[in-house]
Image: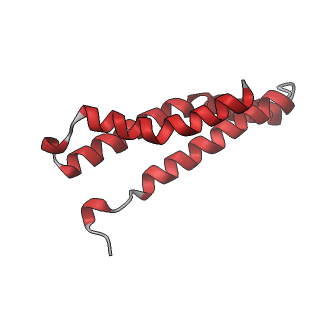
Amino acid sequence: MQSKSSQPLPWVDAIKGFAIIGVMLVHLTERIAEPENVAGRIFHFLGMLGDHAPGVFILLSGFGLTLSGLRKGIKSYEPTNFYLKRLVKILPLYMVIYLLFV
């Protein structure tokens, strides 16, 4: 069993899920929504709400990183180690995708 301080927050996952649905609605409404009738207008409006989803993801990422740092203790935060770990995780995949598609 996980300790209380390391348990995931289900409400964060729920918000991410709604944001994912919002992004999908944006792309779907760009293709099929015809705001000429009431149903089309409602569908189009719901799709417009999805425009805010990337900001929600960024906000939740910042919240998660801050919460993780607070749980570990502020003394253990070293920016160099933080960015080095992120670079090691992200750069290899980025280079593979870059070389495949550019």
Quadrant (top left, top right, bottom left, bottom right) of the C terminus: top right
* Position in image of residue 94 (x %, y %): 58, 33
> Toward the viewer: 38 or 75?
75
Give the vertical position of 93 relative to 55 (above or below).
Answer: below
Quadrant (top left, top right, bottom left, bottom right) of the N terminus: bottom left
Q: Quadrant of residue 21?
A: top right
Farthest bottom residue?
Answer: 1
The residue at 86%/27% (across/down) is: 34
> In the visual, does 34 lie left or right of 74?
right
Give the vertical position of 61 relative to 31 (above or below).
Answer: below
> In the visual, does 20 lie left or right of 10?
right
Give the vertical position of 36 relative to 64 (above or below).
Answer: above
Farthest left residue?
Answer: 75
> In the visual, does 13 lie left or right of 38?
left
* Position in image of residue 12 (x %, y %): 44, 50
Give the vertical position of 43 relative to 36 (above or below).
Answer: below
* Position in image of residue 58 (x %, y %): 46, 33
* Position in image of residue 100 (x %, y %): 72, 32
Q: Quadrant of residue 31?
A: top right
